[in-house]
Image (cartoon, rainbow, N blue to C red):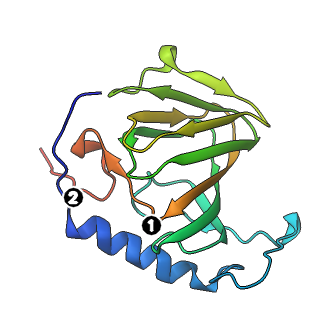
Amino acid sequence: MNSMSITRRPGVHLAIFAFGLMMTAAPATAQSTHVLVPADAVQWGPAPPYLPPGAQVSVLEGNPAAQGAVTLRLRFPANYSVPPHWHSMTERVTVLSGALHVGMGDRLDRQASQALEPGGFVSLPAKMHHFAWTATPTVVQINLEGPFDIVYVNPADDPQRPQTRR
């Protein structure tokens, strides 16, 4: 991995904060007792704007914008991709349905990725450059210690970045 400087952008922090506020109505809040979410009670909503459009999210435990344990699920449509990016925390991903193709590096290389099917697991250490894509509808569960962040390797891949017209 190339060393790179980290540029903090207020927009990313604002989006994470807004995402956390949006999720306060989710089934889980600050945990003082156990969390039990039956499969038919999982509540889905649009994924936050720092992910490409089309994904859905459900926060099962914690607040992604705050410090502490977070468990969330992402539902991706077929032919979805998350460009190369990294996080400041370790991300642990378990595939629940479909297939998630995961690769490491600074560019999305489908040939250099590995498919994880239901029950498959990957642990991605902090700052590891990685990408993901789907060919079929896919649901994953992500466990991490918040606050959640995402930094795209190529800033042009960031869906929150204003698009310039040519």
Q: Please state, as top left, top right, bottom left or bottom right, where the N terminus lies in the image.
A: top left
- Snapshot quadrant of residue 16: bottom left
Who comes first in sequence, dot 2 or dot 1?
1
Residue 110 rendering spot, x and y as whole percentages: 49, 20
| Mark 2, secondary structure of its residue | loop
Q: Please state, as top left, top right, bottom left or bottom right, where the C terminus lies in the image.
A: top left
As drawn, the label of residue 33 is none
Mark 2 or mark 1, whichever is nearer to me:
1
Residue 147 rendering spot, x and y as whole percentages: 44, 67
| Mark 1, secondary structure of its residue | loop
Q: Seen in the image, is 165 located left or right of residue 74?
A: left
Residue depicted at 30% across the width and 65% down the height = 12
Residue depicted at 79% across the width and 36% down the height = 118
- Residue beneath label 2, please? 162
Near-viewer residue (44 or 73): 73
Mark 2 packing: few (<14 Cα in 10 Å), some, or many (20+)?
A: few
Mark 1 packing: few (<14 Cα in 10 Å), some, or many (20+)?
A: some
- Residue beneath label 1, please? 147
- Snapshot quadrant of residue 123: top right
Residue depicted at 56% across the width and 56% down the height = 144
Q: Amino acid at mark 2?
A: Pro
Question: Height in image: 71 above or below 122?
Answer: below
Residue 61 rendering spot, x and y as whole percentages: 67, 71
